[in-house]
Image (tube, helix red, strand yellow):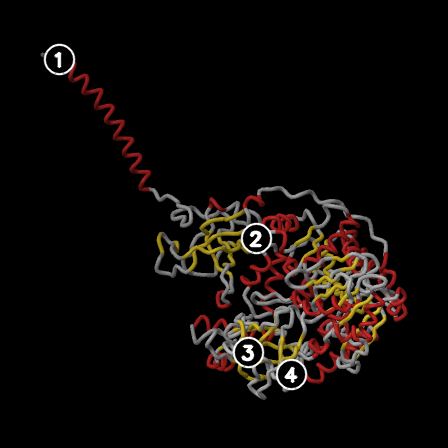
Amino acid sequence: MSSDNGRRRGGDSGQSGEHGEQLALIRESVRKAKEPKARPRTWRGAKLAGELPVARVLVDKGPVHLDRLWDYAVPAELDAQAQPGVRVRVRFGAGTRQVRGGRREGGGLLDGYVVERVAESQYQGPLAALAQVVSPEPVLGPALLRLCRAVADRYAGSLADVLQLAVPPRHARIEAEPSPELLPPPAAPAPGSWSRYPTGPAYLDAVVRGDTPRAVWTALPGPHWAAELARAAVAALASGRGALLVVPDGRTAARVDAELTALLGAGRHVLLTAGLGPEERYRRWLAVNRGAVRAVVGTRAAMFAPVRDLGLVALWDDGDSSHSDPSAPQPHAREVLELRAAQEKAAFLLGAFGRTVEAAQLVETGWALPLAADRAAVRAAAPRIRTVGEHDEARDAAARAARLPTVAWEAAREGLRHGPVLVQVPRRGYVPRLACERCREPARCAHCAGPLEARGQDGGLHCGWCGRESGPWHCPECGGFRLRAQVVGARRTAEELGRAFPGVPVRTSGRDHVLDTVPDRPALVVSTPGAEPVAEGPGYAAALLLDGWALLNRPDLRAGEEALRRWLGAAALVRGQEAGGTVVVVADPALRPVQALVRWDPAGHAARELADRAELGFPPVSRMASVTGPPEAVAEFLAMAELPDGAEVLGPVPVPAALPGRPRRPGDAPPGERWERALLRVRPGQGAALAAALKTTQAVRLARREGEPVRLRVDPPDIG
């Protein structure tokens, strides 16, 4: 018994040692469990960064009353990654009640950007911690941030809205790919066709030297403008700096891209257009942001491309509506590039076949110098322009069948002997607008009051808004039963021309199907404005510009300027007068835009338009903004706004209601609501003060949640 008891005691002694070790392990694990453990996205109990533990973050949230930087604590684990310019995720909207361990917690997760790191915050309360560094890639550099801030201030918008336009969405797989190495600067380009302009070679030389010349370039008609734009970019690269070229559409960008490739070869520039797709666009954007490529050709969104050491910004055809972004705060590429040229000390080149009043103002104020050819060169390069009135009777039966005056029909017949002939029609479709033959009252749909139109040869009537087929129609004003075409569309014109010129191919180019080029052989090319294809070889033998009244009679301050711009764009595709090129414009010859086309004098037309605007106090001589919304909200906003001294309030006036079935356009009132619009006008030099006053008032109303919000638009394009 004693021996057994002894052995039992010995066994108990070993087990008690094991139990002691187990208890020690349990105590250690309990002790560790009581220590605070840092958790991602809250980082409760985590140590802060040793240096600069506070990050100033721009939260990607659009309302203007939140347009400021917010302070967040930087955990030590994120210290190396949370550098200025990177994307982060932060908690927002927690309030001061959710505080644990001296840190604010809770709230929703929002995206943002680290703008800077500081040693301490001016905010005295508890700070929330950065939840996550989304990517260590710095996508918001100091120059881009400064530009976006200036754009937001100019257009009374928020910085977050501008950044959504400037910084593309992230693709993690693309960020992991390396960008190519930066190639050495190319040699200075030869002047080439810039020699046709007296100051053209001097402009290129100034860019090569690293100077910052500013020019408004009136390009000669013909196909050389794309190569000239590319040579200006090569001049900037030869100086060791970058170049940014912004054009209206993808077709134009492809032409400039091809010219740059021919001059530079591959790898020295990138093309940024929406047709690339989000991943490829982000890959090229990253190459530019990393400094691997210093030349960019692109459409509107490329105006924010982060080109390193920017030496030249150039914009082609600033009058095209594509350059105005439809997203808030609706900046225009011309104004953005002007800001970039001033901030980054870059050369500036604004080119087009025509000239807008804004470009004329740049010349008038001396901000930029004119760059144009002399009159002899213009006469040699421009086609012969002939005018004919709208109601001239055609003497030839074929001309009557084609709905063409005799002069236009003869020009088309002669042109078809030598090459293709361009026919510009201001409307697409078949017969997009009909009216009573007797009293000219527009034909309306009985269901939604939309315009009736004929879509084909069957003669059936359909509504242009709701699409319903219309039964037998009669005029509610005079009782008539016969209809006439107010505007004949491109398809109907092509059909009539095909009957008038049997055996000649007829091609159409418009919104549904846009042609890039047409071969250099006889054919009729019917196109809507802006969709004209380029004719291979020397260009079109002739061009017919039909229904000029449809462009000139629009109730818009820019109607004449826009009509001339579209006519010049089409006429520039025609061979020069020495090569037999002829353009016939069907419009009243006494009108100012028609006379400017005949003389090929867009600069003179723009100067006269600017003088008229100055006399009447219209933009761009003055600065304007629009306030649109429900009547009560507009009245409250105007009463609260502290406008600059001398500001004029025009209106408010009712905004035309969007009729049922018609597609809503930006700025239209919601269905069933009545809106008003007021225009605010200030003197030159007060534009910044006006934008600041509007932005402050909007922020106060949103913060206080007083009344319904209103829509602000600085420099509205449609002031009537």
Q: Nearer the viewer, mark 1 or mark 2?
A: 2
The residue labelled by disc 1 is 4
Residue, x 71% and y 57% (percent of image)? 253
Disc 1 vs disc 4: Cβ atoms closer than 8 Å?
no
Q: Earlier in the sequence, mark 3 or mark 2?
A: 2
Vertical relation: 713 (above or below) 648: above
The residue labelled by disc 4 is 437
Residue, x 47% and y 44% (percent of image)? 77
Residue furthest left as drawn: 1
Secondary structure of the residue carrying numbered label 3 = loop
User: Are there few (<14), some (14-19), or many (20+) residues within 10 Å of tag 4?
Assistant: some
Q: Nearer the viewer, mark 4 or mark 2?
A: 4
Secondary structure of the residue carrying numbered label 4 = loop
Q: In this view, does 148 lie to the left or right of 604?
A: left
| Residue type highlighted by circle 1 | Asp
Real-space Cα distance between discs 1 and 3? 119 Å
The residue labelled by disc 3 is 472
Secondary structure of the residue carrying numbered label 2 = loop
